[in-house]
Amino acid sequence: MMELINNLDLLKTAFNAAPNGIAVLKSLYTTKNKIEDFSVLLFNDYFINWINNEDYKEKRFSKVFSKIGGNTILEKCIETAETGITSHFEQCYDDERGNHWLKFTAVMQDELVVVTMEDITEKKHAENELNNALIEAEKQKRLYNSIINGTPDLVYVFDLDYKFTYANKALLTMWGKSAEEAIGRGLIENGYEDWHAEMHEKEIDTVVAEKKAIRGTVSFPHAELGRRIYDYIFVPVFNEKGEVELVVGTTRDITESKQAEEKLQQSESRFRKMIHQTPAPTLVLKGDDLIIEQINKQMLQMIGRGEEIIGMRLIDVLPELEGQYVWEQVLKVYNEGIPFDQSEVLVPHNRTGELKNYYYNLTYRPLIEEGQITGMIQVAVEVTEQVEARQKMEKSENRFRALVNASSDLVYRMDADWMVMQSLEGGGRLSGTGGHSVNWLDKFVHPSDLEQAVHLISKSIVEKSIFEMEHRIIKEDDSVRWVFSRVVPILDEKEKIVEWFGAASDITSQKELQNVIAESEEKFRQLADLVPQIIWTAQPDGFVDYFNSRWYEYTDLNEHEFGDSSWVPALHPDDVYDVLRTWYQSVNAGSSYQMEFRLKNGISKEYHWFLSKALPIRDKEGIITNWFGTCTDIHEQKSITEKLEILVADRTKELQRSNDDLQQFAHVASHDLKEPVRKIKTFVSRLENHLENQLDESTTRYVERIHVAADRMFTMIDGVLAYSKINADSQKATIVDLNEVIKSIETDLEISLQKTGGNIYYQELPVIEGASVLLYQLFYNLINNSIKFAKENVPPLITINAKEQIEGGRRTAVITVEDNGIGFDLDQTGRIFETFTRLNSKDRYEGTGLGLSLCKKIAERHGGNITATGIADKGAVFSITLPFEQREKDI
């Protein structure tokens, strides 16, 4: 009994723990013994929680399940009870929480029906999402195929055996093959040349090995267009293990862009010049911050600013544009590369000190370099007066009239034979059609352009291609405007043209701008032809592409011959190598070019000397856009210069002889002058001895003065000799420690320092290049002067300091020598270094007046200088500037 109870408890626990609902039902019969419903005998906890009612026993099943609605569940359970066949079915119902799905299983067990219920709502939702995802994936696949096969770029896939596993429509067209003929075959089998196939196979190997993309450029033939230039990229496709299983490639035809690059480089510099010469207010913006790189005077006048705004952000110059429609268009053009052309745009901004409304015809174009948008060009023509006048007129005529024709473009449609043109909304003013049907050729093409238009129309009809043409139209007021027409054929399912859809844009302003640029180039050439010099220009690689008329007049060469082959033959044979080497060194280095050479006159066959100069013209990024050069005839100046050089050489020799004679004279004079002075001292000494004890006080004083004068004469003669030798004797530059120099001077002046009680203070003086003997003499004279010109009863105090500075790009030592002596007046500063200058009485202070002159000479010979400042009775400060390194090894 106990075991039975335990088993029942276990069964009940399992019954209630089931993750799904379980119900035990008993059949209820009609009087005709037909099952009409069920009595609920037992629900597990899942069902009880689901119906939220524990009072369920003996109640009808249809009533308990009434919240689901419908009879499907009851019918399925009755079917199982009557047939004994297990039923599996799903039922959906809605409540305040949303849509729910339930899965039921009805099983006959003896006389009872056991129903299990599972909530499959999440599963159903997942299935729906999966189905939706599959539908979206299929849609994306169709979109992908449309894009891949609609692009003019070549798209393809290689397996690791270099076989094509996919090729889009553009590639198959280029090969002239179908997919069946091309897929599964290699490069050579699809018409690639051997070198081309080998190159791509190696690149595929590289992609697989390095697991990264590679990019390149190649030229090969197109089935219809001939040889073209292509830019391509190979990208690895990885499997779930991270291994490369395929290589995807895309190739783009860049033939036209390559050709355009060359033309762009030739015209870029002229374009910059034209910006400033165009009559329309124009500016160029560069970089993400939209910096003003170029702006012509018309634009500066229009916004009321000067050239100081070049290099500033446009939004900083005109902050009131922030948030305006025009600023949004500026950002859109730069960020998306979509050109913007619009007339009569309202732009409130501060031009005269207050915010006012202005109207402009605006043209914005992105500047694209190497496929990237790097800036934009803006052309703005103010039309405020015209707009305000027209607005007043329109307001007076009809305030509520819609401006359906405000667009500057005319949009129209035509029949298949290109005969009847019907304009749509917009552009009525441009065409003058007024919305009526007209003949396109009769009403929309200038007679001068009619023949070309007919030819292009016929070609487009035959080829079912897009028609594009720039042409003139005659408006109703007989004025002529330029337009750009683009007309697209509309084809039916049989590829038959059913009609044409076209648009025409007014490009009169662009045409006028092109004319201005062409006229400006012509003016440049006319001006260049008026200049007496030869003027030429060259491309960045040094290829000469222009000469003015002076070149052809001098050389007698045919016009329009450029490059090395046109000007090198005119050079003197001895100058050819040096000229070419120097010119192409300048081209490679991007530095200015200057050289003298000889050119042959085409008529007289004589060679004249010319001075040639050239400068590289660079854009804002520093890239050379072209070269501008001149050649000036210097033949006469060259002859005069050669004569002057001979004359200078002769004069130099004479000056050298004169210096040698003066040097010899200084030595002879010093020795000859010393002899009579020596005799004076000798005979004065003998006279003293002879008249010993016989001289009175006055006579003794006179004799002492004769001795002093003679000694001063000796000193002066030695000073003159030293001063003359300072420029004559060269010294070798060596490493000189100024600390050791001052230490030696201290030793030599030891007696004078002890006698006066003087002191010299210095530390951490620099080590420099120089002549040791001369530097010793420089600082000896300065320190000796400080001792000599000390104040009475005041011990001399001499302080020497040094610091380092950069002067003229060289490391320089600045050394100051400061004392506490008698000093000098500031107005004497300019005289202190002059030869034989004495600021104090020679009777009170010894000296020749040459010491500071020697100091000045020594400092200058070292590539430095010396200055002095002082205050009377307060001391003096001498400042010596000396370079750390000497440029010459002989001083």
Image: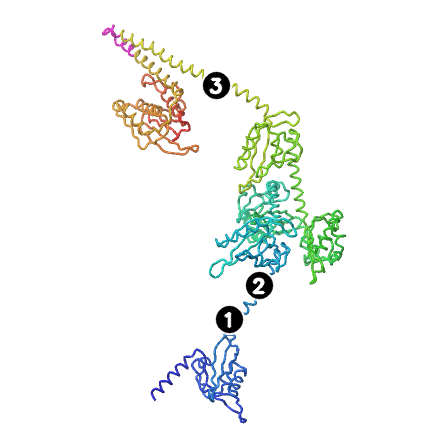
Quarter occupied by the C terminus: top left
Q: Kindly identify the amino acid type of the residue bearing the numbered disc 3.
A: Thr
Considering only order in the chain, which callout, 3 or 1, is on the residue closer to the N terminus? 1
Residue 532: x %, y % from top left: 63, 29
What secondary structure is found at the residue carrying circle 1?
helix
What secondary structure is found at the residue carrying circle 3?
helix
Image height of 572 relative to 220, above or below: above
Location of mark 1 (residue): 126
Q: Kindly identify the amino acid type of the residue bearing the numbered disc 1.
A: Ala
Choose top left, top right, bottom left or bottom right for residue 639. top right
- Indicate the colouring scheme: rainbow
Magenta highlight range: 688-704
Of tags 2 and 1, the one toward the viewer is: 2
Location of mark 2 (residue): 141
Image height of 592 relative to 855, above or below: below
Q: Kindly identify the amino acid type of the residue bearing the numbered disc 2.
A: Lys
Location of mark 3 (residue): 652
Residue 531: x %, y % from top left: 63, 31
Q: Distance between the residues labelled 1 and 3?
A: 105 Å
Q: Distance between the residues labelled 2 and 3?
A: 92 Å
From where the camera sits, is residue 328 visible? no
Q: Does the magenta stretch include residue 187?
A: no
Considering only order in the chain, which callout, 1 or 2, is on the residue closer to the N terminus? 1
Considering only order in the chain, which callout, 3 or 2, is on the residue closer to the N terminus? 2
